[in-house]
Every structure is written in structure tokens, then in C-alpha cells.
Amino acid sequence: MVSGEPDQVMFSTTGKGKTMRQTRREFLKTVAVAGSSAALLECTGLLRKASAEDLAESMAEVKGYTYCDGCNHVPMCGMVYFRRGEVITRLETRQDHNYPNSTICSKGYAQLQEQYHPDRLRYPLKRTNPKGRPAKWKRISWDEAIRTTAKHLNGVKAKYGADKVCFFTGDPKEMRPVLQRLAYSFGSPNFGSESSTCFRSVSLGSLLLSGLPRPGAGPGKETRNCFVWGVNQSYSMATAMKSLLRAKEAGVRYFVVDPRKTPMVRTLDGFHLPLRPGTDGALALGIMNVVINEDLYDKEFVGKWVHGFEELKVYVQEFPPEKTARITGVPADRIREAARAFADGPTTVMLSASPVVHHTNGNQNLRAVLTLFAITGNFDRPGGMVVPPPAVLPSTTDGHPVFCRRTDLLPKLQPLRADRDYFPVWAELVSEIQMNRLPEYVDRGRIKAMLLFGGNAKMWPQPHLYQKALLGMDFSAAVDYFYRPWTHDYVDLLLPAATCFERLAPAAVFGRSVYQRQPVKPLGEAREDWQIITDIGTALGLKKEFFNGSLEAVINEDLKPTGLTVEQLRKAEGSMATVPASGAPKPRKYELGMLRPDKLPGFDTPTGKIEVYSTILEKHGVDPLPTYKEPSESLLSNPEMAKKYPLVFMTGARIPFYTHTKWRDVPWVSEFQPEPVVNLNPQDAKARGIREGDTVILENSRGHITVKAHLTEMVGAGMVDIYHGWVKQDVNTMLARDFDPISGFPPYKSALCDVKKASV
Ligand code: SF4
């Protein structure tokens, strides 16, 4: 609860699993800050019957553009908004937006309810009671907030060193480039993000194998087969389904590798390989066994461009189809059929961020999958895993290395990384630090202060340790849209962020097209992240790097490689410009010297080849081949535990209504699933006397939560699946902090558990 003026007293429901409650008067008060309108009331669905006298004077409807940040990807689907005054009244899909086939989804439309949610933070807040208790906040000015932050960060720098300050971004990803610039300019290499549990393990596996930061993916014109490996885009990126369906109509055959029978199997008529969670590596090795023994690999490519093939050839003999079937649960004839698809390529793969890598053996699993596509000659082959031509700017996820100061400042700071001796492979190849050992970094005095943009202390297994870590810091400040007690009760300052309708930065870049937002005035004193970071940088004394606080100058610096400026984009039709391509896309870039900084043919790895035998892993004393080990907690590795907890526990897969912890208080989407449910196969349910909708206890050796049962064939027998991000029924309390030694990723998808009916 909040002290101070009445405007601040609006935190009572946020994030506690309740639906939004708000009186009409309160709602009108909320929007009155920017001027209310009838259309807004109707489109948000909060007050459908607002009477005429409640409505502001009718104003002309004006069109503007933004792009959605709802998925926690990069700036994504283009939106046309319509506003009256400064109030947005409705949204439409921006048809000329270049994000492929983008169409606003349910969450995108619901952004408007989040935008005008009564609990939105509107002023900088400073706590008036000790950390670790329900916060009491006092409104302060932005000037005080920025000065206080700068004073504490410079204090930690003077006392312990700049590296003791950690700069963290969670959701959205949009502030990553400018926050890196701040961290490295300040003198700390300790910039981290939620990618420590997301896409970066795929990226790391790809770097180890081929030197490419991300594997090319998705079907193209020449593709014959597409492996959809652990991806359920119908839920996680529904807007991309159109292109997959078009490819299906054009004759692409889909192989869906997934423990669950997701809608991808049915919608794409996919050949399903239903594996036991965490056995992706074994499956890939089993398929390679057939590919190699039946001479289906690309001998010319392997002979010229693959390092370690002979060692791999020997190793895969340990994975004949029948044995692989016993490990993975995928029938041997299906393994053979999948392998034989490689005789009829090109074959590509779509990999998602998590199902393959959220295990203690995750990175080797991922390397095995990528190795399969490498030895079959599908790397950068038309219709295969095509390496996209360089975009005019790197994605917001990575930021431009020069703008971020990764090229000139970070190399010198590397020895000061907090993660250096915990995850040495990651520390060598990934510029951002691995955040998952934050409690240990704090315990060992490596982190003393932290800035969190969209941070969530509950995103990790055993979240209480991360809350304790925040509590143990000399200073921390969080920037967010809402007060989220499970994180913000442990910080000193809470600053209000502007939304994707209220921000100018950053540009959205797809290929050669550059888009700029046309922001409306933020609610209250909400401020955009890039501006907050620019202000903090300037207050820290980094005036040159942050152009004396000029946001526009900072964005112009980021835009430099495009040759565009904010002003030019502002004047351009639809605030969009296209930068001409420097040439036609080329396949087999490795032959043309396009994948290495020295421009020599080959791959950007120590041997210049695809390293199925990784010389970097060998240097670090890790198995250089993509070897398979059981997850450390599994039916096979832990048979004693499996007697008590015979079901495999999966969490973290997307559902259509939520993105991680977001949207629980937004009626348009939360009404679809107002409470957590555990998905259970009817066979397992019957064996336990559980029926649809029963209250059940999901338990394992680390804890339990009480939820409702949902019976579904989507989940195979012997496993359960539950969505994460519920504050009370927090699945992360049931997970081990047992990290993959290569990537540092936690095992979100291979714990053991059981489900029983709750007594009523
Ligand atoms: S798919 Fe939906 S939530 Fe994601 S960016 Fe597009 S509109 Fe937003």
C-alpha cells in the first residue's frame, strides 16, 4: 500500500491472481490524466455503458504507429493505434509492417487494457520502510530518483569497484542495447538479462558448433522437410503460423519433435516424434546413427567443412534405433523414418528457446540436434538452415556491438565478470553474464548493487534465494509498469516505465526496414527506459556517452549504421524507411568468406570448420562431442526417486494468454485461464482417481502446490505440464538449482513429481 497523495493509492490488486477491479469513477480518473473518451471505454471493455456526461468532449480521431512488446521478443507486430487527444481508443494490425505475416494477437489487443490499468505506476517511488517487508512507498521527483541512483552506484564504484554493479533487463528486451552501453561505459562487465534462461543456450550451442550466433531456421522455397523441434508456435508465436501453413500447402513435410502432442502435430499434419523430456540429444544421436550407417550424410560437406566427424561416427554407434527408442520413448521405426527424410532434402529445423535446453544436459542436447543438420549438408543450403543476410541493424536482443560498446570496452572488462569461474564456456562466448548464480555472486561480494529493468525475482528455481540476494545488496532500483511485491519489496527505488504506446525508442528493424514509434504522452510521470538510462548515465558523469541526457541523440547514435536519424524517420511516411540492400542474398556463405571476420572461407570457429568435436569445450575439460547424459533427475538416472515421483514435470511452455508473469490482471486474456491448472494425461489421472477440474496436489522432493487438474491427450502418459508465473502456486519453488555446466541453464523441464487428489 502507498502513502502520499491519493493518485498513488492504486496497488491493491496487482499480480496477486485477482482480476482487475476498478470502479467507473476510478477508471475515468485514470484516463483523465490524458483525457478520456467513449471509444476508449468501449474498447477496453472496462465500462461498456458509460453515460454521455462521463465522456470527454469528442475529439477527432488521429492515427499513429507503434509496435507491440507483448511477447517478450524484440519489437514485433506493427500496430496502428487511434487516439483522441492523448488517449488511445482502438488498435489495428499495421499491414505494411515487415515482421513476417504479423497480425495482432489477443495479447496484443489486451495491451490497451494494460495501458490504462488502474494499477499502473505513474510516479517514481522510494521506500520508507526496511526492505524485505511489504513496501511502503513515498512519491519522489524524477530528479531525486536519478540523483539517488547515481549517488549509490558511484558510491559502490568508489568503495568496491564498478564491476560490483549489475545491470539487468528482463521483460521487455527493448532497453538491452542502451543498458549495455551504460554498464560498459560505467566500467562493469556485469550486464545480464533473462536470456540466461531463454534463447542464449541455443545461441551458445550454435557458436560452439559453427561460430554463428543463431542457427538459420524455418522453411524456405526449396525446403522439402522441416523438423519442428520443441516449438509450439501456435501458442508462442501464433502470427508466424501463416508462413508454416503456406509451406505445408507448398509440399513441405513436417516432423514434430515434442513430448507433447501440440497443435503443431495436427495443424501441420506433422510426423510426431514424442520423446521423453530431456532426451533430445539421444534422439538426435539415434537419427545420426541411421543417417551415418545408411550413408545419408553429405560426404563432400563433411569432408571439407566438418571437424571431428570420425570421432562422431564412432560415438553414434552407441545409439542404435532400438536402444534410442528405450531411452527416448520414440519408436525405432519412427527414428528410422525421420533419418531417411535426410535422403530427400533440403531439410531445415525450427528450434525454440527452451524445450531442448531446459535440462541439466541441455546444451549438449542442442549441439547434437544442430550436428544432425550439419552432417547432412543443410547448413546455409537453399531450403536448409539458411543463414539470413545481415540486417541493417542487429536485433534489439543483441544490440549493435559498437553502440553497446561491446567492441571497445567489454574486452578489457572481461576478467571482472561475476560468472567467470562458474560458467567458463558461457563467459568466453556470451557477452552478457550468466545471471542464474546471482545469489552466489552476492554471497561472494561480486555484486553489491543492481538496476533492474522489468526484472522478476521469481523467474528462477528457488526464488527465495534471489529475493534474499536483492535484500543483501547495498542498493537496488527497479523500473517497471507495475508494483510487483515479490520483486519490488526487495528494492530501494521503484520507477515507472512508459509502455510501448508511450515510448519512442528503440527502432524496430526487420531486414532492411526501419520503423519508429509515434508515442502518446505517458500516463502520470512514466518515462521510457532509454530516457531513464540516458538520465542515469548523464548523472553518473558519462555525459559524452549519453549526450548530456538527449534521448534523441542517443537513438541517433544507435541508428548510425542505417544512415537515418530520428528526425528523418519522424518525417517519413508511417515513420518507416527502407535501407537498400547491398546485394542479393547468397547461399553457402562459408565458401565465400562471409562468416568469418578475416573474410577467409570457412566458419568462425577455432578450426574454421563446423566443430562436431568442439575444441573450445575440450579446452574447458568438457566432452567435446555432443555426448548424451541423462538429466540428473530422471526416471533412468534416479530410479529410487522415480518410485515415489514417477511423473516427469515440465514447465515454461507458452500458452496463448500469458507471457510469463504478465497479463494475470488483464481481463481480456486472464478470463481464458484465471487460475493455474496442471495438464495431466487421462490415463495417469484415472490411475489416481482424478477427474477434470479436481483440486490436486502437485508435489516432489522440494515442495508442493495445489492447483486444478486439466485432463488432456496433449500431454503424454507419464508427464505433467503446468504453466509458470503464478505468484502463489509458484512452480519454481519445486525446481532444483542444478544448472547445465556449459550454459548454466536450469532444469525447468525434467524434474520428477507426482499428482494426487487433494482431500476436500
Ligand atoms: S504476437 Fe501478440 S503479443 Fe506478440 S508482438 Fe504480436 S501482437 Fe504482441
Image: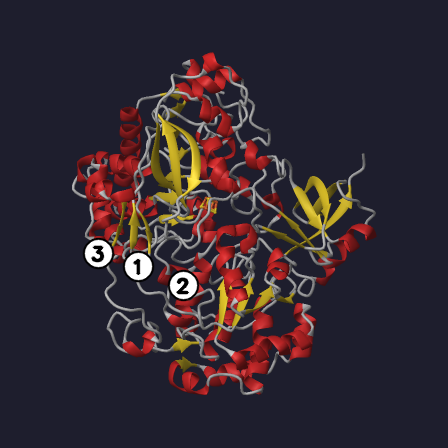
Work out how far the residue at label 1 is from the one at label 2, CA to CA, in angstroms. Answer: 13 Å
Q: Is residue 628 left or right of residue 40?
A: right
Q: Does the residue labelled 3 lie within 8 Å of ligand 1?
A: no
In this rendered view, identify the residue nearer to me: 597 or 143.
Answer: 597
Mark 2 sits near ligand 1, with its Cβ under 8 Å away:
no
Residue 452 in sight here: yes
Q: Nearer the viewer, mark 1 or mark 3?
A: 1
Instruction: Identify which residue, 687 or 752, lies in the foreground.
Output: 687
Q: Quadrant of the C terminus?
A: top right
| Residue 295 quadrant | bottom right
CA gap, disc 1 and disc 3: 22 Å
Q: Is mark 3 on a helix, strand or loop?
A: loop
The residue carrying mark 3 is 408
Residue 318 percent location from the top left of the image: 61, 80
* Front residue of this view, candidates 695 and 618: 695
Q: Is residue 687 above or below residue 22?
A: below
For the point 54% across and 70% down, which residue is it?
A: 251
Q: Which mark is residue 214?
A: 2
User: In the shown orientation, is residue 733 left or right of residue 689?
Assistant: left
**Residue type of the residue flagged with mark 1:** Ala
User: Which residue has dot 1 on it?
Assistant: 391
- Is tag 3's residue or tag 2's residue first in the polypeptide sequence? 2
Helix, strand or loop at disc 1? loop
Crowding near the residue tagged with mark 1, few <14, some 14–19, many ≥20 C-alpha atoms within 10 Å: some
Give the percent coordinates (x, y) of residue 750: 62, 57
